[in-house]
Amino acid sequence: MRVKARPFILIIHGTKDRTVPLWHGKKLFKNANDPRFALWVKDAGHNDVIDVAGEKYYASIASFVKKIHAKHYDKIF
């Protein structure tokens, strides 16, 4: 039996990333299956996304995890 996985995707990317250009993140997001989520961090580079995003970084991850939990909780219990 073959199962098609539909993983949840969260992309967090700095808009001024010069190591991995923003267009890479945008293309990954565009081509990802739903459910997909993104946090585009204005003025963040490659290594300062957490510092620049601040609480938005942690909030986006918490929201992402809650969505996964809500989707799968009913199937488990």
Image: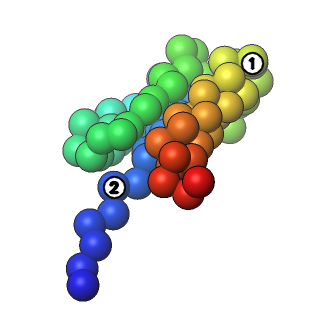
User: Where residue 61 sits: x, y (%)?
Assistant: 64, 34
Total numbered circles: 2
Mark 1 residue type:
Gly
Which quadrant holds the C terminus? bottom right
Asked whether the beta carbons under mark 2 and mark 1 sit within 8 Å of each other, the answer is no
| Vertical comparison of 2 with 27: above or below | below
Query: Which numbered tag is attached to residue 70?
Result: none
Horizontal relation, residue 61 to residue 34: left or right: right
| Vertical comparison of 76 with 25: above or below | below
Residue 60, quarter of the rendered image: top right
Residue at image location 24% in from the left, 84% down from the top:
1
Q: Earlier in the sequence, mark 2 or mark 1?
A: 2
Query: Which numbered tag is attached to residue 6?
Result: 2
Which of the two residues, 5 or 77, is positioned nearer the viewer here? 77
Q: Residues within 10 Å of mark 1 (few under 14, many from 20)?
A: few
Residue at far bottom of view: 1
* Residue linked to disc 1: 54
Horizontal relation, residue 52 to residue 11: left or right: right
Residue at image location 29% in from the left, 46% down from the top:
32
Q: Residues within 10 Å of mark 2 (few under 14, many from 20)?
A: few
As helix, strand or loop, the secondary structure at mark 2 comes to: loop
Mark 2 residue type:
Arg
Tag nearer the camera, 2 or 1: 2
User: Where residue 52 sits: x, y (%)?
Assistant: 70, 19
Residue at far front of view: 77
Which of the two residues, 3 or 34, is positioned nearer the viewer here? 3
